[in-house]
Amino acid sequence: MPPKFFPTRGHLLVCQGPHCQARGSSLLYRALWNHLERSGLAYYKKGGSLRLTESGCLGACSYGPTVCVYRQRGGGLEEGWYAATDFPLAARIAQAVHEGVELPAEHKYGPEGEG
């Protein structure tokens, strides 16, 4: 029997590289995971839609914790990269992905975030 498939709206990755861990990324991951479970946003909960994964280095070592998000939007794949991410920002990112609205601009970096 194949594993059960859970449809998702997005995937959040929290960097666990050594520099991000030194800035609290392990705690951020655990807090965000608990938040997704309690609020029913985790992909395996009824009505939930988000996957959360610990990641290797995401490359913004001096600005961690780093969070990356991917989701299908507007017929394509949208990505968002965040530096110096704290729990309130991570929770706002997760909520935006779940609701399908614009991602927060705070601490966003990369081609679309460099305004």
Image (tube, rainbow, N blue to C red):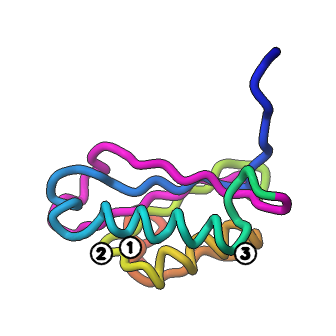
Residue 7 position (above or below residue 104):
above
The residue stretch that appears in magenta: 46-72
Measuring 43% from the left and 79% from the top, which residue is drawn there? 87
Mark 1–mark 3 Cα distance, whole angstroms, equals: 19 Å
Mark 3–mark 2 Cα distance, whole angstroms, equals: 22 Å
Does the magenta run of residues contain 101?
A: no
Q: Residues within 10 Å of mark 1 (few under 14, many from 20)?
A: few
Label 2: which residue? 84
Numbered label attached to residue 61 = none
| Label 3 secondary element | loop
Given contact means CB atoms under 8 Å apart, are the residues at marks 3 and 2 in contact? no
Q: Nearer the viewer, residue 2 or 94?
A: 2
> Identity of the amino acid at label 2?
Ala
Which tag is nearer the camera, tag 3 or tag 2?
Answer: 2
Label 3: which residue? 101
Does the magenta run of residues contain 51?
A: yes
Measuring 71% from the left and 53% from the top, which residue is drawn there? 43
Label 1: which residue? 114
Mark closest to the chain's N terminus, 2 or 1: 2
Query: Quarter of the image holding residue 20?
Result: bottom left
